[in-house]
Amino acid sequence: MNNTRIIALNSDVNNYTATSVETDIKIEAKHRILKNRVVLAEQQLKVQNQNYLIFGGISLVIILSVMACLIYSQYQLNYNHSKKEKQLKAALLKMETQNKHQEQRLKISNDLHHTIGEQLTSIISSLDNLKYTFAINDERLKEKLKTISSFTSQASYELRDAIWAMTKTEITILDLQARILNYIDFLKLQHANIQLLFKVSTDVDTSVNFSVLKGFAIYSVIQESIQHSLTYEDVSMVKVTVRTMVSNMVFKISNNGTGSRTSTKIRGNGHNSMEKRIQSVGGELEFIFLENAGNEIIITI
């Protein structure tokens, strides 16, 4: 009886113990699950915070980049505005300076015309009066007066050329053509027996412009070349032609004279002077002397 009771009691104790162990295992499993959840929640919170930091950093970079672009754009606009304003001021200043220089050139040209020009005209008139007022029988004196009158007329014409150039801001092919034709007409009064010709080729772009310095250098050398031909050559024809060769403008002054050996040195000195003048404006000059077949002076610009 007692044994049976003891066995039953042991069975109850074992059952209680098993139940207790099972309960402890369940509690521990719950604790482990809760702990894992806490760890996972902490990890998720950490990842979330990291994501917030990354997104915040990216957003900050984007915002700073946009601000930098806006600031740079504003700076660029201000810089361009300032640059254009400076360029406009510089252009206005340059224009104002050019206008002042032009006014000064016009004033100087007017002064030259009313002083030196009138004085040269007066000298020419006085020389002409001497010829008709007094009976001059000395042939050498007559020749001397004629030479002085010729030189004075030439100086007067060259002065008018200088005044013409001073009133220009640029010189076109048409300007050169008109001025050369005027000079040829002037020479025809003194050299009626010599044929003076001027021709512009059809391939020449008449809209081409030269600076005053370059245009006047070209005209001066052409004028001097014609004058040399008439002075130092036995000619019956002097011709000036203008044509285009590749990208260059070519001016040729040719004659059919034979010249003389005594004038070779004079032509050489004149050539050196003309060559330096053309080289000073970026051109080239070639002097061709053909014995008993005429001379040519070629200006290439």
Image (tube, helix red, strand yellow):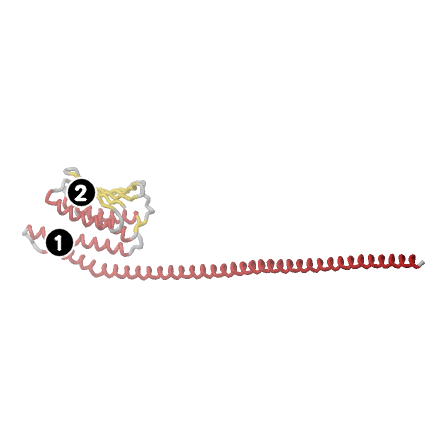
Q: Which residue extends farthest top?
A: 293
Q: Is residue 146 above or below residue 197?
A: below
Nearest the viewer among 57 and 72 is 57
Nearest the viewer among 63 and 283 is 63
Q: Secondary structure at mark 2?
A: loop
Q: Residue at x 14, y 40 (%)?
A: 258
The residue that mark 2 highlights is 194
Residue 271 in percent (x, y) is at 18, 47
Nearest the viewer among 262 and 242 is 262
Contact, mark 2 vs mark 1 (Cβ under 8 Å)? no
The amino acid marked with disc number 1 is Ile
Residue 211 in percent (x, y) is at 30, 52
- Res. 56 mark: none
Q: Residues within 10 Å of mark 2 (few under 14, many from 20)?
A: some
The residue that mark 1 highlights is 148
Q: Residues within 10 Å of mark 1 (few under 14, many from 20)?
A: some
Residue 148 in percent (x, y) is at 13, 53
**If the image is split into quadrants, where does the N terminus sit?**
bottom right
Figure quadrant of residue 155: bottom left
The amino acid marked with disc number 2 is Ile
Residue 168 left/right relative to 140? right
Q: How many marks?
A: 2
Q: Secondary structure at mark 1?
A: helix
Figure quadrant of residue 53: bottom right
Q: Residue at x 23, y 45 (%)?
A: 285
Q: Is residue 97 visible?
A: yes
Residue 86 left/right relative to 36? left
Q: Residue at x 15, y 53 (%)?
A: 151
